[in-house]
Image (cartoon, grey):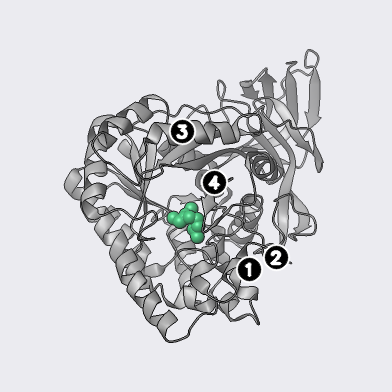
Amino acid sequence: MPSTLIKNGTVVTAERTFAADILIDGEKIRDIAPALPAENAGRVIDAAGMLLLPGGIDVHTHLDMPFGGTTSSDDFETGTRAAAFGGTTTLIDFAIQAKGTKMRDALDTWWKKADGRASIDYGLHMIVTDLGEAGLEDMDSLVAEGVASFKLFMAYPGVLMVDDATIFQALSRTAKNGALICMHAENGGVIDVIVRRALAAGKTAPIHHALTRPVTAEAEAVHRAIAMAEIAGVPVYIVHLSSEDALNQVREARDRGVPAFAETCPQYLLLNIDEMNKPGFESAKYVFTPPLREKHHPPKLWEGLKHDHLQVVSTDHCPFCFADQKSLGKDDFTKIPNGGPGIENRLQLIHHHGVNLGRISLNRFVELVATTPAKLFGLYPRKGTLAAGSDADIVVWDPNAEHTITAKTHHMRVDYSMFEGFTVKGNAKQVISRGEVLVDNGQWHGRPGRGQFLKRAARGGAWN
Ligand code: URP
Ligand code: ZN
Ligand code: ZN
């Protein structure tokens, strides 16, 4: 691959902002310095007025995932392409161990889903549904294959939920293998009883998905997950944290020096339970878990991001089409497939509502969407920063580009947007993955199958 020189841009990392050129040699960044000579470069990109960001890393996506009686509508081809359009050059998706089978089988299944389709690099977490006899050894083997994180569910009884003994055993094992346990923290047993009561009372509309999952059920589970990790003496990572109450649990633990980490997602920062009061079945578009919360929660989550009580913004991208998938639950909210789309809009939304509106700095933005995800999940410094020797995953970001988010023009394979009509200032102009320009001024130059599986290192940033 010929060398590329990106000239006249402003480099933004988690630590600093400075004027410099970036020289790319093949798949790697070779040099970052002012006034690099252009003579020998095969290609020159003029980035005057642009910010140069490390490619975004989305550590929570569900592509081609069987769930709720259907399959998420983006596969690895459409999902990674949409991610790239939004400036995300790496994602970590979830393989799911089917109960009674080996985790290794699930890894093969998910490799087949991604193979020949992914256009950006990807890693996999493993969802553990069954530790069985050999599960703990299986975890070690998976870590050796680069699957350095596992997700366990405290919700969805009968489907994905595991008991506390399983969670504690898995957590304890990470002291040996250095993996990071990701927890879906909601009290599934309590929620199940509340759901059954709601259905018995004839409450079947989408809003009851939200009303049957109280914040206390989330806060309790976050507390329990962190307590179990503390007893095991290992770090823990809470996924898709949605409420002030849950956040307080993470903050309290971190204040005591416990290595507890948490992510939130754009939907919890920018939407609230009002979306569930839309007429007819429209609110099904916002049925995901945990649900949208009352209005006072999002500002607390923004504060949490600013003060490092929350460390990561991911999307939990899990799209289902409104017309023929969400409609499975027309008469019963428990049959609405849980999940919403967002893989394409994360950087746009967090840059606009975070940086432009003065809630977080530009450097903190980079830290939340790229650097800390890379560190916690064993990809740093190959990914997540701009430095000589790192992969040339670079976003040429136009901080003044205005863009209106709409399903009419987005690249996700789903028939609605959770952020329909949101106007943002700041968008990806060029998106480069390992030295290849995938997106250039709205044009797609990527190729399905070029994305590589990332073997991630154990004992990443959560263990420091
Ligand atoms: O509703 C959601 N979040 N669907 C995806 C699965 C999960 O729990 O992350
Ligand atoms: Zn979850
Ligand atoms: Zn998820």
Q: Which residue is mark 1?
A: 327
Q: Residue furthest front?
A: 100
Q: Amino acid at mark 3?
A: Leu
Q: Earlier in the sequence, mark 3 or mark 4?
A: 3
> Which secondary structure lies at badge 2?
loop
Q: Mark 4 or mark 1: which comes first in sequence?
A: 1
Does 146 sit left or right of 260 as displayed? right
Can you see residue 32? yes
Question: Measured along the vertical axis of the image, is residue 390 above or below residue 317?
Answer: above
**Residue 456 quadrant:** top left
> What residue is shown with label 2?
323
Report crowding for label 2: few under 14, some 14 to 19, many 20 or more residues within 10 A (C-alpha): few
Point out which mark residue 109 bears.
none
Disc 3, SS: helix
Looking at the rendering, in which quadrant would you find the C terminus?
A: top left
Number of other residues with Cα within 10 Å of mark 1, as a class: few under 14, some 14 to 19, many 20 or more: many
Residue 277: horizontal and vertical position, in percent? 59, 81
Residue at x-position 73% and y-position 60%: 405
Query: Which residue is at 80% across, 17% downward?
Result: 42
Residue type highlighted by circle 1: Ser
Q: Which of the two residues, 237 or 185, is positioned nearer the viewer here?
A: 185
> Does the beta carbon of the residue at mark 1 sit less than 8 Å from ligand 1?
no
x and y percentages locating residue 384 in the rendered image:
53, 35
Residues tagged 3 and 2 counted as in contact (Cβ below 8 A): no
- Between disc 3 and disc 4, the foreground one is 3
**Marks 1 & 2, CB-CB < 8 Å contact:** yes
For residue 107, the mark is 3
Of marks 4 and 1, the one in the foreground: 1
